[in-house]
Image: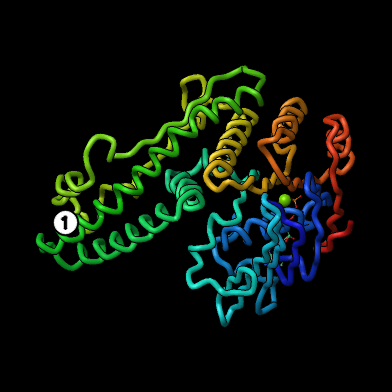
Amino acid sequence: MRLKKLLLINFKNLRQCEISLSEGINCFVGNNGAGKTNILDAVYYLSMSKSALTLTDGQSIMHGEEFFVTEGSYVNDEGREEVVNCSFSRRGGKVLKRNGKEYDRIADHVGQFPVVIVSPQDTELITDAAEERRRYLNAFTSQLDRRALQALMRYNAVLAERNKFLKMSSDESMLQIYDMQLAEHGTVVYQFRRDIVERMQPLVEEYYKVLSDDSEQVEISYRSELSDVPMQELLLRSRERDIVNQFTTAGIHRDDVIFRIGGYPLRKYGSQGQQKSFLIALKLAQYRLLAESTGEKPILLLDDLFDKLDMKRVERLLGLVAGDDFGQICITDCNKVRLEETLMRANRQYQLFDVDGGDVLL
Ligand SMILES: Nc1ncnc2c1ncn2[C@@H]1O[C@H](COP(=O)(O)OP(=O)(O)OP(=O)(O)O)[C@@H](O)[C@H]1O
Ligand SMILES: [Mg+2]
């Protein structure tokens, strides 16, 4: 999958721009605050119908404006052209169209135009609470398989109802009905997550080895209460506790993913560069799994390429993504000279865009 043209109106600090991208590497350079990350976020937005950075759609509307528009013209790996248009206005909400036709359900779009972003914000995956890692897994599994997204949405809906119910009543026959539904959808989500983490492990290991020149061993594992006890039984066991606490205390909404380096928790024992390399390996593994399942090479977004990496690791990363497994890439950096020198040393062709105060110049 590749993006041929990107059109933006009022997307954050980008008032109006039209960018024709090249097939290979596209570099966006400019000073801090110029709008480089916002461009990558717009590309992400078109694929996921939400920002990788802001929590609400409203935050992506340029200050003082009423709406934003993003539009992408794509060519898939078979050469078919497609246009995705996503707009959001404060009054009318979100409208998402593919080739001029509005989607009935926005969820149907996710995964059709695969994208993977590597950004400095990824460190939240290591430093923040389990919720952040679940959010990541959810977004990833949703891109991989629509059934995972559906099961998750149903699980969350029943969970919210069950929690509301627990605040008013402890009627066990009603709880039994909720539990049956939670168990059904929760088990599906559990299986997707378990499967995905299992498939990621060897890839993360492989990529980390290349990035670090084989210096450390890394591990990713899935932690869920469902590994030991089936969901229905888990809910039964925690029922009394749930009634006392007035919310659901067990289930896949408490899952976590554990990262380790040299056998120790990455968060405590990994250096900043090691953590960053781990996150890149994780994202490249995600890329590979997405490519396998969709049959399309995702668009790879590398925000702030040099963030926390030494020059050797940047070069090894560029070497990795130069391979046949990868397709179109968008890179940002605030230092044009450094980026150009590095790409030239890596012997890579690229297209350069200067970003300045929300304007993009070729
Ligand atoms: N909704 C919005 N309306 C207008 N401007 C916004 C909005 N959201 C963010 N911005 C502005 O966009 C700019 C940040 O853009 P961006 O994060 O893309 O910068 P950058 O070029 O990636 O910078 P850096 O090199 O520091 O990463 C900031 O000046 C910020 O105030
Ligand atoms: Mg940035």
Alpha-carbon neighbours of circle 1 within 10 Å: few (<14), some, or many (≥20)? many
Q: Nearer the viewer, residue 280 or 292?
A: 292
The image shows residue 11, relative to residue 132, as above or below, that is below
Residue at 64 percent across and 45 percent down: it is 297
Q: Position of residue 282 (x, y in %)?
A: 56, 36
In the rendered image, the vertical position of residue 44 relative to residue 339, given as above or below: below
- Look at mark 1 in the image and give the residue it sits on: 243
Could you tell me residue 105's position as x and y percent? 48, 69
For the point 42% across and 43% down, the residue is 130
In the rendered image, residue 110, in percent from the top left (x then y), is placed at 53, 58
Q: Quadrant of the C terminus?
A: bottom right
Q: Amino acid at mark 1?
A: Ile
Instruction: Describe the element under mark 1 as helix, strand or loop.
Output: helix
Quadrant in the picture for residue 96: bottom right
Rendered location of residue 72, percent (x, y): 70, 63
Residue positioned 73% across, 44% down in the render: 304
